[in-house]
Image: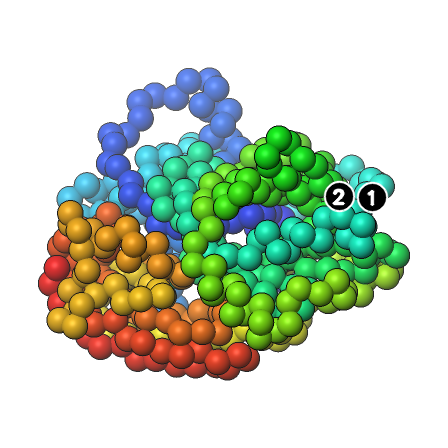
Amino acid sequence: MKYSNLLDRSLAVPFAIVASASVVACTSTGPQSPEQGAAAAEVSYTNDIRPIVSNYCATCHHGDDPDGDFVLDTYEDVRGMVESGELLARINDERDPMPPAGMMSQRQRDLFRAWQDGGYLNVGDPAFAPEHEPFEPPLITPVDVTKHGFDLLERLQGHWVGKMNLMGQDMPWFAWDYRAIAPSHVHAIFEGGTLGNLFTSFFVADLRGTRTIMARNGGLLNGIYRTSYFVLDRVQKNGKSTEYRLVDAYGGEGIMWMNLAFTGESLVFTSHTSRLGLAGPPKRHMRFEGRRMHPELARSAAKAVGFPALDAAYDFADGLPLPDWGAGVPVTSYSYIWEDKDLSVLSLAKLCGDPIRIDQMPYLATLRVEFERGARLRDMPMEIYLSRSPLTAADGKFLMRHGYPSTATFDGVLMFSRLTACETEMTFTYLHPGTYYVTAVCDKNGDGYPSAGDLSHKSVKIEVLPRSAGEVRLPAVDVQN
């Protein structure tokens, strides 16, 4: 599917990071105020409802054999279930909710009622096609890293562990694993599991005659592939802190930008995004605060690939190719987008014209993980962890302290993914080579973390080789904690 019908939905969260979060049950709202009525008229299937359905429902309620004969594949499917009252009843049922892992947030549930009250708007319909003003890209002056700024790549090296605030939601634990994958290329990824992934690479490039640092940010979210490109345009000292700003390499800071501030062994990483200029100026999307841990991982990777070097990893002498977002939609960003849930990530990358595809990324590997659920765990959420050391003892139980894995153990987690009900496999993409312990956890108590009451198994040790496509099958998840 091409971009013109995707923009309002897929670009709503250009830095989309998908993470599990606890939700609370609330009672339904009362009569609407005039302001609420106006907001309801703006809620659409494409912008608001379809992302929720894709996140929470599509895994089990699609195709020829959906759970409970409850199909939610199309606009017509979802509208029919809302009109009948069945979908609203299920998502608001505190005793037997959908999704089975727990009720979605009150705001998300309210959106379905607002969509109904607003007349089931579908902005993908031609009748609702927005009109856009022409866009004139600003002049961006990249930092010449032959003079200063090259140390950003070296400062990034490390396993950063800390806390994340994403779109106002606080996550008390989050991590990025930045390692070199080429002499002038550093990479990290967050694997979200069911919903998708997020990657960020920083690399040296020749951009229109300037040797600078660029960033490649994006991922695969609900079948939508998106990659955006940024360029370093500012380096400045603020007391003991050094800050690096990268802006959209085509549309500049008015479209989106990121800032990385390093103070000793600490990092504050913020991003500001808009709907690529189609809905106002950028607003803060995320703020990550963390400390560097396990530097030996980055040192080992740097030695293996010959990092650091000032050589250009990519040559964009004439700039990047301009994306095609469809008729009548002005391009405001070097962002490449395509949707098709039936295609591989590589196929999507080729269709959208991504200048640096996954098969062109050096050194990285993939790992396919399979596990058994059993009938009693079929509807339970599962979490997959890749860690430096085992999360469980020889008997398969968590190495716990005060009911949770010890801080030292959990801070060794390098990848963390959440799978919805029914799923029995996932693939880690863009994976750093190295030694990992793989652990599947059935989150029976729904708190989003390994803890007392959850089911686990003995962690499995694996070795991931550069450019490999590995597979691992885990034991049954049946050890009670």
Position of residue 224 in the picture relative to residue 31 (left or right): right
- Work out which quarter of the rendered image holds the N terminus and state it: bottom right
Q: Position of residue 366 (x, y in %)?
A: 48, 75
Give the residue pinned by disc 1: 141
Depth order, front residue of 380/306 = 306
Q: Position of residue 312 (x, y in %)?
A: 76, 65
Depth order, front residue of 105/458 = 458
**Picture residue at 66% right of the left edge, 43% below the top:** 244
Amino acid type at image mark 2:
Asp
Q: Residues within 10 Å of mark 1 (few under 14, many from 20)?
A: few
Amino acid type at image mark 1:
Thr
Q: Earlier in the sequence, mark 2 or mark 1?
A: 1
Depth order, front residue of 298/391 = 298
**Picture residue at 64% right of the left edge, 39% below the top:** 243
Position of residue 3 in the picture relative to residue 468 (left or right): right
Can you say whether 309 is above or below 131 in the image?
A: below
Give the residue pinned by disc 2: 233
Position of residue 397 in the picture relative to residue 466 (left or right): left
**Picture residue at 47% right of the left edge, 30% below the top:** 40
Find residue 340 and report its image quarter: bottom right
Can you say whether 140 is above or below 304 in the image?
A: above
